[in-house]
Amino acid sequence: MHISEGILPLTTLAGGYAASAFGVAMGLRTIEDRQMVRTAMLSSAFFVTSFIHIPLGPTNIHLVLNGLVGLLAGWACFIAIGIALLLQALLFQFGGITTLGVNTLNMALPALACYLIFSPFLSIKKIPVFLTGFLCGSVSVFLSALFLSLSLVTAGESFIPAAKLVFATNIPLMFVDGLITALALQFIEKVKPEMLTS
Amino acid sequence: MQLEVFSNGTSLLHSLDPRAKLLAYLPLIMLTALSSNIHQVSASLAVGIILTGIARLYSRLLVQRIAVVNAFMIFLWITLPFSISGDPLWHVGPLTASRQGTMLPFLITLKANAIALYTISLPGTSTIMSLSHAMLHLRIPGKLVTVFYFFYRYIGVIANEYSKMLRMLHARGFRSKTSLHTIRVYAFFTGMLFIKSHERSEKAYNALLMKGFSGKFPLLAHFNFRRQDLIFACLTGCLFLIIILL
């Protein structure tokens, strides 16, 4: 889920960079040496899971999992997502360097929102982990798709159909990412619950 | 896993100081991304093509990369011609594509290709390690660069785990198809990958701690800004001005 180079106006690009820089700075303030290594490897896992393609009828979709990263990384999600997008832009020309700020914001802000909303759910035993995970996974993709479409619209009214199309293509992903996040979270809770509490 | 596919080479661009390349790269991509002048963008694309040629990177792989960049443009090509009004060009059912409407996606496609070529030929010809070193010189916080270093260092490790687990799945007869079973398998797969990365990070951190890690790495090799770097920076600076004046 990224916006390519050459579409957005300067105000959107600069705004994206400013907001992401703030998020990254907040993340850097909250992490100590141990979390530096942890965040980095979480980001490596995030980068590698984007290679997973889930078949969906005649086509397939690749996982985003920014909600899961948000839950696991907290405020450091801006760092984890930002560096993964930087590497994708440098190595694979997905997204881009000028759009790195906007793309990071579009994916990390929903992740952070999911962290703030859903991580308290995990400590309440009454709410099933599956439900928390599903909401976390689908809400984060929903918000990312929404922010992505809104950023496209800042390039001009003529981009409204493209924005709608991009949003619509992400709807199946909301369900798939929600399901995967739900089951993965259940799995992590069973196998290594301390990952969710620390 | 080989990720930096364009960084192996002996061309002039490969041997330049990464700082000089970033100094040339950042203004050029900003200019290209924000320009709405077809002459500027075409000139930029031409420069990109020439730079990739100087770096001797013309290959099947380059074509594949550029094809991916252009695949993302499909969204724009199928919507913009219909959403911008102007002289009718052709009709599809009730929709009319306008001549003006094809100019914008054309311009954006040129820009995206130009920037992709810049990215491949300038930062792409340096290793990620030397680029992260160069980031320190660009006043990017050291802590962030250290996290980036670890991230890049461990992608290979995590990717190995990934392919090992995938082989294991296939050995047990797993075939991915559109089903809940596939989703469940991939979810546990993902969960396991995150758990492995977490455990690995604990081990790596403990090992680092034992070696006296204090949050950053000392630098052994330093950059050396030579005359060829200066000449390159001046030449690209001139190119930048010429493109602006077009």
Image (cartoon, rainbow, N blue to C red):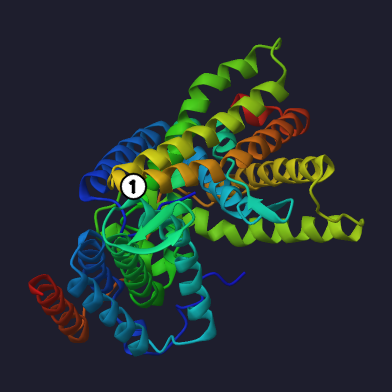
Q: Residue at x 29, y 77 (%)?
A: B45
Q: Residues within 10 Å of mark 1 (few under 14, many from 20)?
A: many
Left-right relation of A16 to A44: left
Q: Residue at x 31, y 59 (%)?
A: B101
Left-right relation of B37 to B83: left
Q: Quadrant of the C terminus of chain A?
A: top right
Q: Residue at x 59, y 28 (%)?
A: A136
Residue located beneath label 1 in the image: A101
Q: Position of residue A90 (x, y in %)?
A: 42, 64
The answer to whether residue B236 of the structure is visible from this angle is yes
Q: Nearer the viewer, residue B117 or A18?
A: B117
Left-right relation of B50 to A108: left
Toward the right, the furthest residue is B172
Q: Residue at x 61, y 16 (%)?
A: A121
Above-or-below relation of B117 to B131: below
Name the amino acid type tagged 1: Gly
What is the chain letter for disc 1?
A
Q: Nearer the viewer, residue B20 or A5?
A: A5
Q: Nearer the viewer, residue A152 or A47?
A: A152
Above-or-below relation of B177 to B2: above
Q: Position of residue A85 (x, y in %)?
A: 45, 53
Above-or-below relation of B91 to B239: above
What is the total number of numbered labels drawn onto the structure image?
A: 1
Q: Position of residue B35 (x, y in %)?
A: 20, 63
Figure quadrant of residue B48: bottom left
Report helix, strand or loop for mark 1: helix
Above-or-below relation of A14 to B223: above
